[in-house]
Image: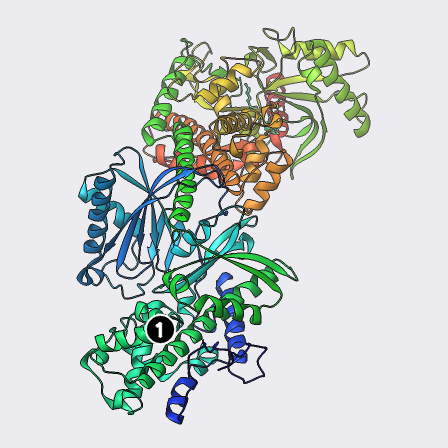
Amino acid sequence: MDSVEPAGLEPGARAPSCPQKGILQPSDSSELECLQQFKVTKIQLQQIQASLLGSMEQALMREASLAPGVRMLPTYVGSTPHGNEQGNFVVLELGASGASLRILWVTLTGIKGQRVEPKSQEFVIPQEVVQGTGQQLFDFAARCLVEFLDAHSVGNQGLQLGFSFSFPCHQTGLDRSTLISWTKGFRCSGVEGQDVVQLLRDAIQRQGAYSIDVVAVVNDTVGTMMDCEPGVGPCEIGLVVDTGTNACYMEEARHVAVLDEDRGRTCVSIEWGSFSDDKALGPVLTAFDHALDQASLNPGAQRFEKMIGGLYLGELVRLVLVHLAQNRVLFGGYTSPALLSQGSILLEHVTEMEDPSTGVVCVHTVLQDLGLNPEASDAELVQRVCVAVCSRAAQLCAAALAAVLSHLQRSREQQTLQVAVATGGRVLERHPRFHSILQETVKLLASECDVSFIPSVDGGGRGVAMVTAVAARLAKHRRLLEETLAPFRLSREQLEAVQTQMREAMAKGLQREPSSLRMLPTYVRATPDGSERGDFLALDLGGTNFRVLLVRVAEGGVQIINQVYSIPECVAQGSGQQLFDHIVDCIVDFQQKQGLRGQSLPLGFTFSFPCKQLGLDQGILLNWTKGFNASGCEGQDVVHLLREAIRRRQAVELNVVAIVNDTVGTMMSCGYEDPRCEMGLIVGTGTNACYMEELRNVAGVAGDSGHMCINMEWGAFGDDGSLGMLSTCFDVRVDQASINPGKQRFEKMISGMYLGEIVRHILLHLTSLGVLFRGQQTQRLQTRDIFKTKFLSEIESDSLALRQVRAILEDLGLPLTSDDALIVLEVCQAVSRRAAQLCGAGVAAVVEKIRENRGLEELTVSVGVDGTLYKVHPHFASLVAATVRELAPRCVVTFLQSEDGSGKGAALVTAVACRLAQMARV
Ligand code: G6P
Ligand code: BGC
Ligand code: BGC
């Protein structure tokens, strides 16, 4: 019988079944008809390839797939092995090869090409367990683990386990995986919809013999793909044909809709066993397939798998033999009870019966074991049935693989794709012809692809250990990250403690007792009442920008013209004279531009630094903050310094009426719109707050009735060490590197000048732990102030996908992986969240003070807020409000974002002062 080369098939022609030397062709019609059904044409294979491809792409986009299709499940394996994974790992394989589980002890040397043979042991799972309860199954697995570990005395310290679980699962992490549905004869109750890692952890716990950390759950196709020897591969497809069948491959992360990822690749488990597009599969499904499906544990499910998987091939052969026997084509029409019983022909039987050399002998043995007494012709026909069933299985498997290849070609825009496929599973390993038919048919259906098939060495055990090594590394990183960020996660108790301490410090400060809160009287006794009128000049110094403003307060409201000027660092840290001369230069420039030369308008000076005010127009600078350090100013009356500078600049007339803190200016500015506004809050470069206190509570200021606005200077809260319990090593580093170490401790945990630096120090620390940037410290990250606080606002913005986070970090020249961006995002969130909560605790302390001052059950109050961080950060404001609601439930607090800055407030304070002075003169 001359062999026929499987040349290209004419349309409609059946695909090659590679007739084997010594295997006779079919003789009569029914026999022919019966086997004919298993012949699949090239067109049909191409239709299956195309339909499966369509189903893959729909499932990737999470679009409802037209045909019940493949699942395309992310596996959270983000890269093929680097080869430097190392360590000892326990691997538990469940479900890859039927009712058995295998346990391995795998040692990864981390040295390319250096392999240590894994120790392994197989355990048969009793049928009543395979179809019992989930607890029974996982307890059985845990008992086998104990038996294995006892037998292999690997000690009981830090055992890390990789769980190869070969069933369709929704994974939400490397160690979190929910079973979608059982396949392959498994049907344990109470497992579908459950996290199988937790079920295993609970079972191991119940054994109580070993403390084993289950760090990763992996589909067997992934283990097979990862087991591919670097140097040969990397294999980017993992193909398993054992009792079941499936494949995984490395997909562009951006194509996987459920993953908010756009860079790099991620491994996707296709779960092609559930492919069942009637249009494509209908024509090749035979009556035997339907009969098998109806009799299976999961009728209607895994239709594609039931035509390929080793659990079903023997059964298909049996059903055909029964059919041919009942049609008197075989065994003289005799059927034995064994032949009639489901599952009596196994995969091993089929592979043996097809063995080219011993096949015919094996056929006799198998049939006699089934209580049959075959003729030679029976044996030949039985072999032909095996060939027909398995050839079709291999061809269908090839069509599916060809679909994956076409998809990779398309998604990588490669004309010719070169790829290595790791293969595993007993059908591929043991069946005499399955592999070759698969290869040939793939060549036929995906001729532009250069595919190499790499059999996995030990069924993927090492691959699972590789993933476990990666998972263990990520888990360790996660732990180190949690440990690093834990001090930033403030509990309600800690926030209440801050609130209480702030209240105590406020009380002491108001009584002029030693306190880190200076509680400075501002001589602003009232918020505007709307009757203010006139044109005013205002200066706004101390924030991000220095502004000169012309403020017109009229019937119809307030108009503002302002100009932003910069304060160069050399001026901010130069001499006081230089600074104030620079300020006057800006004023003169502004007057010129606004045509105000020669006009002496009342001027309000927002000076955002701690000043001991002796009057509305007298403020002694106590100390610089926020990077300012001009000499000869601290302890001086800054209004005097300004007036001196004006005097030095002859021909300039300015009437400095009031000096206000930016918190006061902000409160006044918002109070102009909302009379309930009795607190001012700044969260910008620096942070601070003021509020209207009962005059009777303010020591050192005459009068017992009425109110006075108090500038708390809360930036200095904790400078007495009272915040020590919250201060982290990163806060200490930022403080020590600042120009005012030991000062403004509360500010240095909250405000814009410092948050970026805190993040940078945490990133340096995590890099030194190897958690970030693969442990590579970069010059850039060592550079002070390189990580701007505005990056936090950008990185944490919800609308920013991870890719933009990466873009920001790459601009900083940081060599980051996909996980790095996520970690940086988490660090930013932890730092800004703590800042907002501390700020909220401060506001809660103040509004509660006001409520108690007035003996009110409930207080309704508004807070005027300004500052870049508060305004720009996507979550800061809402976190502050949430913290206030939690800590001051009896206060209804409205936060009013000041639109015109505190310059307007300074002008209003000036306007009030002028009005009062006017009234005093009349
Ligand atoms: C506004 C106010 C300034 C204040 C600043 C604080 O601009 O007008 O008086 O100092 O906010 O925020 P910043 O982010 O600029 O430091
Ligand atoms: C499962 C897959 C598995 C395949 C091969 C199928 O039944 O659904 O998860 O990869 O069998 O074991
Ligand atoms: C200053 C305050 C100012 C705050 C906000 C702090 O550094 O000490 O006076 O209100 O920054 O700008």
Residue 900 screen position, x and y as percent: 62, 34
Given residues 793 and 434, the one toward you in this image is 434
In the image, what residue occupies the spot 32% across and 60% down?
Answer: 97
Please tell me in which quarter of the rendered image ligand 1 is found. top right
Would residue 819 be found to the left or right of residue 213 on screen? right
- Residue at disc 1, secondary structure: helix
- Which amino acid is tagged 1? Gly
Would residue 629 be found to the left or right of residue 40 on screen? right
Residue 603 quadrant? top right
In the image, what residue occupies the spot 56% across and 68% down?
Answer: 443
Given residues 227 and 385, the one toward you in this image is 385
Given residues 286 and 825, the one toward you in this image is 286
Residue 875 screen position, x and y as percent: 49, 39
Residue 814 screen position, x and y as percent: 60, 34
Residue 135 quadrant? bottom left
| Above or below, comparing residue 28 to residue 254 in the picture | below
Q: Residues within 10 Å of mark 1 (few under 14, many from 20)?
A: many
Q: State the residue position of label 1.
A: 359
Q: Of all residues shown, which one is farthest toward the bottom?
A: 29
| Above or below, comparing residue 419 to residue 649 in the picture | below
| Above or below, comparing residue 390 to residue 90 in the picture | below
| Above or below, comparing residue 801 to residue 288 in the picture | above
Given residues 58 and 313, the one toward you in this image is 313
The quarter in which the C terminus is drawn is top right
